[in-house]
Amino acid sequence: MDHAMDDAVADFVKVRMYRGILGDCFLLTTCIAGETKYALIDCGVLQHVPAGDALLKKLPPEVRQKVGEARLKAVQAGPDQIKRIVADIIKTTKHHLHLLILTHEHFDHLCGFHYAKEMFLDKSVVIDRLWMAWTEDPADPQAQRLRARFAIGRAAVANALAMAPELAAAGGHRLAIAEGLAAFMGLAEEVAQKPGPKRAAAVAGQPRSNSTRGMIEQMQLKVGAASTSYLAPGQVVAGAEGVGLTTYVLGPPRDEALLQKDAPSAGGAKEVYLTHTDDAVALSSAVAASARRLKVASAVRAEAPDQPFARPHRWGDGKELGPDDPRTKLVALYRESKEAYRTIDHAWVGAAEALALKMDSDTNNTSLALAMELPGGQVLLFPGDAQIGNWLSWRSQDYPSPARSGESVVTIDDLLRRVVFYKVGHHGSDNATLKELGLRKMVGGRLTAAIPVVEAVAAVQGAGSKVPGAGWRMPHPPLHADLVERTEGRIVQGDGDPAAEAKAFKENPTHPKHPVQVQHQSEDGGVWVELTFPIEADSKAKSRSAFARS
């Protein structure tokens, strides 16, 4: 689109969402008072997602039919797509990012700094400032405790994941949930790179460049401590320190009870909450015991290769015991498939998956959540993958505002009322958008939304790679329906139809004179879609309370 607008809208803010990925990567361009600046918010994609044809070959026919072969064939390999995206970022910004924002330590928000490491670390690429949450501050005692606790749990899950191949060979569970969640934590790739026990050791040791921690540290090193800020809830950052937008820091909270609140109070996930280090220690012990058992089992399989489900203490089929031996019935009962649920051989698998689920959610709740205010009062909401506790904490504080006549503080309800752009949290999952105290507070009438998701990729995650319909439902249908209603259809999505998206913005403009405009890189969508928010000259003098649709 042509940005040579009339004088009334000479200033603007553009939000570019990168497409074709189940991951977050957003580029902001601000043009205010003749000065253009760029901010990058996260850069990642879910790992281990092959290109379309390769993906089709990995999936059973019934899954391909359920998801749709055409949609699956259109999927781009994650590492290749993120490299194309980073190349576009560097070209667009002319090698200069004024601000880099890393919201939280998840692979689907960070792995671009690994896959495109050479591009980001090139000396020609300049990054002026780095923003992260207080939870990443190496000098913060509370943050240090949280990271230490997370490291213990991470190592426990890594040990469990390292057992997955042995479990399968022994006829055990596949750790489907934990393996799927490991993609977000960046564990799957690390564990896969080392054989046997060395896998877990590699993950538990010093941060590797391809670990989420390593990615954060390499960007901290590039930008430098003096130019890195760790933001706290309630803080207000003046536009001059960023890209010209006043930024309100909403979360993550300091209250650890809220940091660990990942689902609604009556939510179905409540019974799987694990919050103590003891859970990780107990899991590690159980995994070690199972490993010893499976080591013996592998030796038995070597002697009896025709029996793939060997047990470490094989009793054969029980015939050698004799019909009168009391153990005969016991063996038959133990081997009865209908009674398998009563055995405890792999009971620790449930604990591993619960711990992985809890760690995944807790990490989401450490997301740096930001409300970025345009000069005219419009607000762009970037909550990362904040979950329930993070959202609720936004009401724990008011927000100091720049000195304006008659105003001393800003409330969260005021900010939400003025939201014109919502980056939908956690790819549109069911517990990353607050309903009554969140989305339904965005009542300004100019709301637009962006959902960084590829539905076909989400559908084949976890158990969905084997069982039709058992994958991740992203976006969550009730949430998506509410978004459509609130935005009047003005939604862009990582795999959205460009023509349909353009039509929705044209038929339901956000403003009669200066509507938000949508542009896709190409007719087939390309690697990005971009929304342009005009800053009307007459709106700059308005107070925030005067913000309205027209």
Image (tube, rainbow, N blue to C red):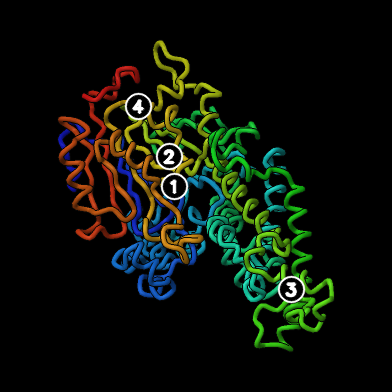
Report whether 174 appears left or right of 456.
right
Q: Say if 527 sits above or below 395 in the image.
A: below
**From where the camera sits, is residue 538 visible?**
yes
Any mark on residue 382, and which?
2
- Label 1 sits on what residue type? Ile
Exactly how many numbered labels are in the figure? 4
What amino acid is at disc 3? Leu
Q: CA distance from mark 2 to mark 4?
A: 13 Å
Residue occupied by mark 3: 294
Q: Residue at x 66, y 77 (%)?
A: 309
User: To which quarter of the image does residue 324 belong?
Assistant: bottom right
Q: Are marks 3 and 2 in contact (CB under 8 Å)?
A: no
Disc nearer the start of the sequence (1/3): 1
Look at mark 1 in the image and give the residue it sits on. Answer: 41
The residue carrying pointer 4 sits among few (fewer than 14), some (14 to 19) or many (20 or more) residues within 10 Å by Cα, namely many
**What amino acid is at disc 4?**
Arg
- Compared to 241, does 207 lie above or below? below
Q: Earlier in the sequence, mark 3 or mark 2?
A: 3
Label 3 secondary element: helix
Seen from the viewer's position, the closer of residues 167 and 154 is 167
In the image, is 83 to the left or to the right of 165?
Answer: left
| Residues marked 2 and 4 touching at CB (< 8 Å) | no
Q: Amino acid at mark 2?
A: Phe
Left or right: 524 as drawn, with respect to 144: left
Q: Residue at x 53, y 42 (%)?
A: 367
* Sequence-first tag of 2 and 4: 2
Secondary structure under badge 1?
A: strand
Residue labelled with disc 4: 418
Tell me how far mark 1 sits from mark 2, CA to CA: 9 Å
